[in-house]
């Protein structure tokens, strides 16, 4: 099935969407990557604050929950000029899709009109659940009258999120499908301090989610990559100075199959477009 | 335990997890197996035995390229015991509904109950098994010995009596022992057999016993029924 070039970045709060967009814009301005700025966007309000903060050497702030910002950036990729629609929104909206089990017209439109989805997952924040199947044996809780703690696990949350968005899009799951194309980006890769591949990290952190994806997507329509848009925490003393001295556009990398430390962040978009 | 195992990376061979309508329900049960801060587990609550309690857990599983929607009915042992003694018992409405609508059965034999109740437990199991068989009409049955980590504590003569009775009632049925507790990874009772129970029943559902229908010889002079297609004239 043919897919349009509209990209939707999906990610819960603190998954790194805003930082990535600000860093991406910096790379586009540099005009050294696979995607380059064709002409200045009319309005960069949507990413201005994050872009400014990184230039100051401080971390970006969470996008307000009700915000739906869009920046239209004219870009050139392999001689073709098109407009990249960078949409940023409060990650709480994604969290609420699952928590409230409902989606509004905005999300129906997003799910339907964007044929390429980039799902941001921050592996270092995926909670590990230690249960009887792993522990082997445990005594029964004597105070068992207490209700179990409510709230879903992170893994279940992501399965439910993707199911909800596929439902909003109207994608049937009877047969494996190729659209929407799916790029899974494991964000804040630097926090993991690992030599593993992104596929191995996803399998280790969320094996049931990984199974859910491979059972439904055709293999050529889905890919997993790692990304560290910022490269290191700016809260650690001295790191801010690095950003001020050496400029934000020189930091951040992707973990791709052909290069485990690809500095050209625009290749994330290229990967999404090549699926 | 099945969901906990899938959650932590075990797989049902050839049955790939493709989604679920009841993730929150699975989560709620799986959470009771979560080890708490004080090192204990809560264990699932007993299934309510009200006649109008219905609880279904859904898995979408892809097998040989086809998507199968599987519903697991969680039912209380008490209600099924009432149904086993009297299939028309007004207090066993949900058991009746499950029996009428299920495509396959997992018959649980509780090892702990056999240790504690001995002959009485045997009586209940045998009665339930007979009732399950009465209107089975070829639907698969898998016999599941649960809490089998305690198996050695059961009286041998009672186990033999139950096994003998079940193998007479369901001569074709596969029998598996399971437990929530494991000694290592992979543990036969916990990790392998809990998954094997699901796989066994799913495989049987996907490959039903072939129907043995004897073709009847057509005895007629009507040309319409005698026509064997164009091949017949060659």
Image: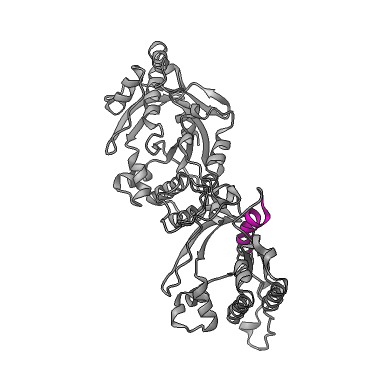
Tell me which residue sits at (65%, 79%) in the image. Answer: B227
Tell me which residue sits at (46%, 29%) in the image. Answer: A188
Left or right of residue A171: residue B2? right
Q: Can residue A247 be seen in this view?
A: yes
Tell me which residue sits at (39%, 16%) in the image. Answer: A240
Give the magenta-colored segment's residue range.
B187-200
Residue A222, x across and y down, in percent: 52, 40
Q: Where is B131 relative to A87, above or below?
A: below
Left or right of residue B81: residue B225? right
Q: Which of A100 and B74 lies nearest the eye of the viewer?
A: B74
Q: Where is A224 relative to B214, above or below?
A: above
Residue A163, x across and y down, in percent: 43, 50
Residue occupying the far front of the picture: A142
Is B191 covered by the magenta stretch?
Answer: yes
Q: Where is A138 relative to A89, above or below?
A: below
Residue A87, x across and y down, in percent: 34, 34
- What colouring does the structure picture have? one colour
- Characterize the magenta stretch by its predominant secondary structure: helix
Q: Can residue B177 be seen in this view?
A: no
Q: Quadrant of residue A117?
A: top left
Is B10 covered by the magenta stretch?
Answer: no
Residue B157, x across and y down, in percent: 72, 74
Q: Which of A148 and A215 lies nearest the eye of the viewer?
A: A148
Q: Which corner quadrant holds the C terminus of chain B?
A: bottom right
Tell me which residue sits at (58%, 51%) in the image. Answer: A133
């Amino acid at each position: 099935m043919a897919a349009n070039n509209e990209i939707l970045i999906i990610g819960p709060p603190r998954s790194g969407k805003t930082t990535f967009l600000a860093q991406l814009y910096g790379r586009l301005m540099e005009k050294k990557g696979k995607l380059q700025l064709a002409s200045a966007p009319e309005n960069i309000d949507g990413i201005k604050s994050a872009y400014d903060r990184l230039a100051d050497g401080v971390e970006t702030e969470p996008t307000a929950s009700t915000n739906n910002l869009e920046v239209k950036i004219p870009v050139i990729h392999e001689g073709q000029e098109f407009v990249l629609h960078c949409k940023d929104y409060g990650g709480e909206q994604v969290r609420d899709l699952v928590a409230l089990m409902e989606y509004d017209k905005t999300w129906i439109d997003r799910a339907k009109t964007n044929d390429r989805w980039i799902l941001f997952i921050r592996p270092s924040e995926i909670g590990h659940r230690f249960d009887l199947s792993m522990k082997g044996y445990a005594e029964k809780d004597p105070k068992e009258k207490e209700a179990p703690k409510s709230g879903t696990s992170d893994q279940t949350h992501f399965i439910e999120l993707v199911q909800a968005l596929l439902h909003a899009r109207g994608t049937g799951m009877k047969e494996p499908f190729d659209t929407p194309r799916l790029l899974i980006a494991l964000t804040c890769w630097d926090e993991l301090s690992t030599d593993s591949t992104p596929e191995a990290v996803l399998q280790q952190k969320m094996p049931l989610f990984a199974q859910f994806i491979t059972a439904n997507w055709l293999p050529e329509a889905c890919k997993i990559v790692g990304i560290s848009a910022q490269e290191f925490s700016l809260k650690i003393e001295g790191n801010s100075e690095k950003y001020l001295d050496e400029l934000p556009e020189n930091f951040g990398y992707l973990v791709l199959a052909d290069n485990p430390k690809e500095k050209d962040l625009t290749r994330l978009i290229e990967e999404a477009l090549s699926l | 335990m099945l969901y906990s195992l899938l959650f932590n990376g075990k797989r049902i061979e050839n049955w790939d997890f493709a989604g679920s309508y009841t993730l929150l329900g699975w989560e709620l049960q799986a959470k009771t197996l979560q080890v708490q801060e004080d090192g204990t587990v809560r264990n699932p609550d007993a299934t309510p035995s009200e006649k109008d309690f219905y609880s279904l857990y859904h898995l979408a599983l892809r097998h040989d390229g086809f998507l199968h929607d599987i519903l697991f009915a969680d039912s209380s042992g008490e209600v099924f015991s009432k149904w086993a003694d009297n299939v028309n018992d007004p207090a066993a409405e949900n058991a009746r509904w499950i029996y009428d609508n299920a495509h396959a059965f997992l018959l649980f034999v509780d090892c702990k109950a056999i240790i504690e109740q001995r002959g009485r437990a045997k009586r209940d199991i045998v009665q339930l098994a007979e009732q399950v068989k009465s209107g089975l009409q070829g639907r698969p049955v898998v016999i599941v010995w649960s809490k089998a980590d305690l198996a050695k504590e059961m009286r041998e003569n009672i186990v033999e009596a139950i096994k003998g009775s079940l193998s007479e009632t369901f001569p074709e049925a596969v029998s598996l022992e399971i437990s929530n507790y494991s000694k290592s990874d992979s543990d036969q009772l916990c990790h392998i057999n809990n998954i094997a129970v699901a796989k066994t029943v799913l495989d049987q559902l996907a490959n039903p016993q072939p129907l043995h229908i004897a073709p009847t010889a057509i005895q007629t002079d009507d040309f319409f029924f005698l026509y064997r297609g164009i091949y017949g004239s060659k």
